[in-house]
Image (cartoon, rainbow, N blue to C red):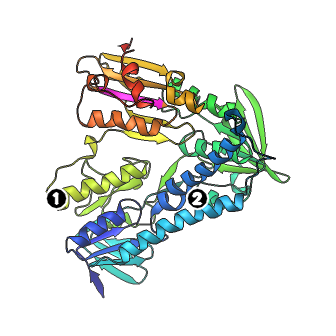
Amino acid sequence: MVQRFDAIVIGAGQSGPSLAARFAQAGMKTALIEREHLGGTCVNDGCIPTKTLVASARAAYVVRHAAEFGVQHAGRVAVDMRAVKARKDAVVNQSIQGLTRWLEGLANLTLIRGAARFTGPQRIAVGSDELEAPKIFINVGGRASVPDWPGLADVPYLTNTSMMDVDFLPAHLAVVGGSYIGLEFAQMYRRFGSAVTVIEAAPRLIAREDAEVSAGVQAILEREGIAVHVGAKDLALANDGAGVRIDFALDGGARSVAASHVLLAVGRTPNADGLGLDAAGVALDQRGFIVVDDELRTSAPGIWALGDVNGRGAFTHTSYNDFEIVAANLLDGGARRVSDRTMTYALFTDPPLGRIGMSEAEVRASGRAALVATMPMTRVGRATERGETDGFMKVLVDAQTERILGAALLGIEADEVVQLLLLAVAADLPYTRITQTMWIHPTVTELLPTLFGKLKPLV
């Protein structure tokens, strides 16, 4: 017997639960299908647990440097990794329990546990059960990519998911991948007390950023004792006694790193496989992401794809914004589009990197006349007071319209301050509205007028 619904949502990540709830609250009979755990990557092995671990790592760092602030403590700083993990688990469990209570308490919503698979354009199988709906929404996320490197199948390795089970201190953690996930774990475990090495294939860390951003982040990590190798090619792994040996080519020569543990952080793979998308007529791109239009509709009528699986964003906030776009267009008479949003994200190292809009390379490629300004964090009173003067602020402005094109803020509280610039972009305000505004002292934000005062032509 086929169960019929008004809407079916596959996956309970950041888009799925909220979208299912909106449909249910609108009086639509809705099914939410989840094969593993509610909350998706963000709640279980992404944002919430990793930032909880970052907080513990920062606490250890602050204690070690307390004497610089005139605060004395007795003895060696020790990190109890079991207690660190227990704290992380408690925070995660609280989020999952809250989400579960909310969903189970909603009228018109049926929560189904199991793996979903299309058996037709509007039909889903979950085990022996069959479901049908005129509207189906895919929110199945992604997973850590595992490359086909020589020897990798023969050695133990960690991913961002299996790292959540670690309750010990690795003697030497080798992080393969120098982007957002890898760098956060690298600094975190260095602060816990591990020796850490980062190995990156690109010529620099976080290669999508401008060169000075990459250099600034690398300098911060290296000052904390993290070894960084960029431009590494031809990686191969092998068992090496109690650990793993990573061999690679660097600058024309052979290099090798012996580590007790290896973390793979080389990208994400969409969870589109196994869904039977061919039966529904849903097209994938060459990378395996579900192809969607500007309103997140797939190639199949009545089917939408949201979150990491559609390749239109790889963050919790892009996934949640996907929900907002679909809900507004289907339930509120809206006409919202993915292309309307301004690119924004953060790298949660300490200090963090906050990014919005275009990079300098992208502005140059656009051919438009632009202005640029940079300022070191040593100019910021808040940073000096805290003893955290690493980094800089950089903004790019359209020379004709005076609108902000992009910004890269690397420094204390940068992940919060950059969102003020994001709001200016969203409100279509000229940068002069910021320079003419009185800001609170002493804060990081109050230096934005000074930063904009340094604008000069980008040549």
Residue at image mark 1: 332
Q: Position of residue 420 (x, y in %)?
A: 35, 36
Q: Residues within 10 Å of mark 2 (few under 14, many from 20)?
A: some
Query: Between 61 and 257, which is closer to the camera in this rendering?
Result: 61
Q: Main secondary structure of the magenta part?
A: strand
Which residues, given as a range, are shown in magenta? 404-409
Give the image quarter of residue 252. Answer: top right
Name the side, left or right, on which 449 lies relative to 389.
Answer: left
User: Relative to residue 5, is residue 210 depicted above or below?
Assistant: above
Residue 372 in magenta? Answer: no
Dot 1: element: loop
**Figure quadrant of the C terminus:** top left
Dots 1 and 2: beta carbons under 8 Å?
no
Give the image quarter of residue 88. Answer: bottom right
Q: Position of residue 370 (x, y in %)?
A: 32, 17
Q: Which mark is residue 161?
A: 2
Q: Which mark is residue 104?
A: none
Q: Is residue 384 visible?
A: yes
Query: Between 182 and 380, which is closer to the camera in this rendering?
Result: 380
**Figure quadrant of the N terminus:** bottom left
Which residue is pictured at 60% across the width and 30% down the height? Answer: 387
Which residue is pictured at 25% across the width and 47% down the height? Answer: 294
Q: Position of residue 458 (x, y in %)?
A: 38, 14
Residue 407 in magenta? Answer: yes
Query: Between 61 and 422, which is closer to the camera in this rendering?
Result: 61
